[in-house]
Amino acid sequence: MTITPSPTSTSVNATVDAPLDRAFEVFTIGIGTWWDADKHILRAPVARMEFQPWIGGRIIDHGTDGSTCAWARVLAYDPPARVVFSWDITTSWKIETDPAKASEVEITFEPVDDERTLVVLTHRHLDRHGDGWEGMRDAVSSGWNLDGFVTVLGAVQELPWISDDDMRARLGSSAQYTMVVLRPTDRLDRPNVDPIIWAHGRRNMALIAEGIAPVVTPVTSEGGPSGFAIFATSPDETRAIMDADPGVAAGLLTYEVHAVRGFPGSALP
């Protein structure tokens, strides 16, 4: 529905089938998933849209030819309730370089219930565009709609939505682990050293069985690392374990140790 609350502004609203945090994220960071393909001033076809989620950030269209068009500035960013950006476009549909001549677009998000959100978009201060601003008002009044946004949010999701509350709860349960990146040396002369690699593999299986290294993943592609592993031990403990590895002790493999955080219970399918 379109409402015109004053001669210098226009507004549309929609109730979308999405919780508040999802509606806000899809509108902003996910802007390229729902924005109308024919509503761009970039000459080249648009490959992607970028929304920079901070005050002073930009909304940027990226063309398939590498060209870019930054057509808005983020003026307010208050997730998941409100966002405001400038409309840096002239009445001749070119980039406006004078901020004083740019109108503003405000979007508010209000929960209707746990699974639905009222979204209100107001395009205001259209008279700032100067001579011919009425034409801009008429164009955006007929052009603004939330149909694509409603469609995207109503579509079947490929992945489940993890709410902000779920995110905070999961992050609060994370624990410290150690990642090992295993790399080959020039002494890894196979098949001559295969008995050592066999002993290395046997030890890895023992570490898995004991829960010391819950995840061990040999790399099967050519070049690069030999493998990755997640240890449930401190970095110092992990170094002592790796120094006793048959492949490392023989100089066939070297390793890097990185402190990481993960989620207890995570496992390979």
Image (cartoon, helix red, strand yellow):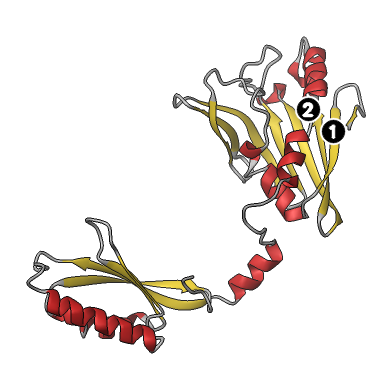
Q: Which residue is identified by label 2?
A: 144
Q: Residue at x 59, y 36 (%)?
A: 58
- Label 2: few (<14), some or many (≥20) within 10 Å? some
x, y percent for residue 8? 86, 23
x, y percent for residue 249? 15, 81
Q: Residue at x 27, y 57 (%)?
A: 221
Determine whether, in the image, residue 152 is placed left or right of residue 246: right
Instruction: Give the amino acid type for the residue marked by disc 1 in the picture.
Output: Val
Secondary structure under the numbered disc 1 in the rendered image: strand
Instruction: Give the amino acid type for the residue marked by disc 2 in the picture.
Output: Trp
Q: Which residue is identified by label 1?
A: 12
Q: Is residue 151 visible?
A: yes
**Residue nearest the observer in this picture, 232 or 90:** 232
x, y percent for residue 156? 70, 49
x, y percent for residue 182? 26, 69
Determine whether, in the image, residue 82 is placed left or right of residue 224: right
Say which label, 2 or 1, has the lower sequence index.
Answer: 1
